[in-house]
């Protein structure tokens, strides 16, 4: 099912920044531009820290294409990296000022590639996520991309019949946690549905979105 990533209509955007569309060609040009910059860098273990979910997704695919080790800290702060024993070589980020003590590559400094070819990351690419640390030290949860892809296929089998293909995915959960990574970013991305790039933290935002389009809300019991 996740091959839909490679077959989705070019008329469907990858993501939305408010009402602004991020077209599929632009997303993949970002991915290939980032991958070229990463491949030119000697760092092997990269923390991926982006507030914007579309840049986060592009960075994830770019690091996978470059065959780098991917680490997702539990929060977009330098302290989150220091709270783990992740042994980071560099940080790929859209907020470089927060990581002045690390070697950084800013997504804002990357040139778009002319290449807009979509691809699926290799199943063996490893993604390290971390628990929040609310009940002790943050714990590493490592997943190969193949595991993530199979979990997304299971989600789609369960929910596909009840969802419109062009429904916009909106989330109240951050993408750097495993649940947000899977359901708010990778699920719509691999299944060809657009997602909002910013977390919605207020019920009024969700109500406003619901009047504008068909939505899928990815949330948590605490928020609901």
Image (cartoon, helix red, strand yellow):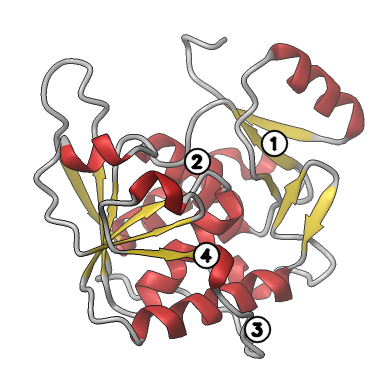
How crowded pointer 1 is (Cα within 10 Å; few <14, some 14-19, many 20+) is rated as few
Does 132 sit above or below residue 214?
Answer: above
Left or right side of 141 for 53? right
Q: Which residue is at a point 81% across and 18% down the rendered structure image?
A: 207
Give the foreground label among 1 and 4: 4
Secondary structure, mark 2, is: helix
**Image location of residue 189, percent across then percent down:** 59, 57
Residue 107 is tagged as 4
How crowded pointer 4 is (Cα within 10 Å; few <14, some 14-19, many 20+) is rated as many
Give the foreground label among 1 and 2: 2
- 28 vs 34, nearest the viewer: 34
Q: Which residue is mark 1?
A: 162
Give the foreground label among 1 and 3: 3
Secondary structure, mark 4, is: helix
Q: Spatial distance from mark 1 to mark 4, Cα to Cα? A: 36 Å
Q: Spatial distance from mark 4 to mark 2, Cα to Cα? A: 23 Å
Left or right side of 10 for 121? left
Q: Which residue is mark 2?
A: 183
**Image location of residue 6, percent across then percent down:** 61, 75
Give the foreground label among 4 and 3: 4
- Pick out the residue farthest to the bottom: 114
């Amino acid at each position: 099912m996740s091959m839909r990533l490679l077959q989705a209509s070019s008329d469907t955007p990858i993501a939305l920044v408010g009402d602004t569309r991020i077209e599929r060609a632009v997303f993949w040009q970002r991915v290939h531009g980032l991958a070229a910059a990463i491949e030119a860098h000697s760092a092997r273990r990269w923390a991926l820290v982006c507030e914007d979910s579309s840049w986060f997704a592009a960075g994830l695919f770019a690091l996978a294409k470059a065959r780098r080790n991917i680490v997702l800290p539990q929060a977009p702060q330098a302290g989150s990296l220091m709270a783990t024993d992740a042994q980071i070589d560099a940080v790929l980020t859209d907020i470089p000022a927060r990581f002045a003590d690390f070697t950084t590559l800013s997504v804002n400094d990357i040139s778009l590639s002319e290449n807009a070819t979509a691809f699926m990351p290799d199943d063996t690419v490893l993604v390290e996520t971390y628990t929040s640390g609310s009940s002790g030290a943050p714990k590493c949860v490592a997943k190969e991309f193949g595991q993530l892809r199979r979990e997304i296929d299971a989600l789609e089998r369960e929910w596909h019949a009840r969802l419109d293909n062009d429904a916009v995915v909106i989330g109240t959960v951050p993408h750097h946690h495993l649940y947000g990574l899977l359901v708010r970013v990778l699920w719509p991305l691999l299944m060809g549905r657009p997602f909002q790039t910013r977390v919605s933290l207020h019920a009024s935002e969700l109500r406003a979105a619901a009047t504008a389009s068909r939505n899928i809300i990815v949330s948590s019991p605490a928020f609901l």
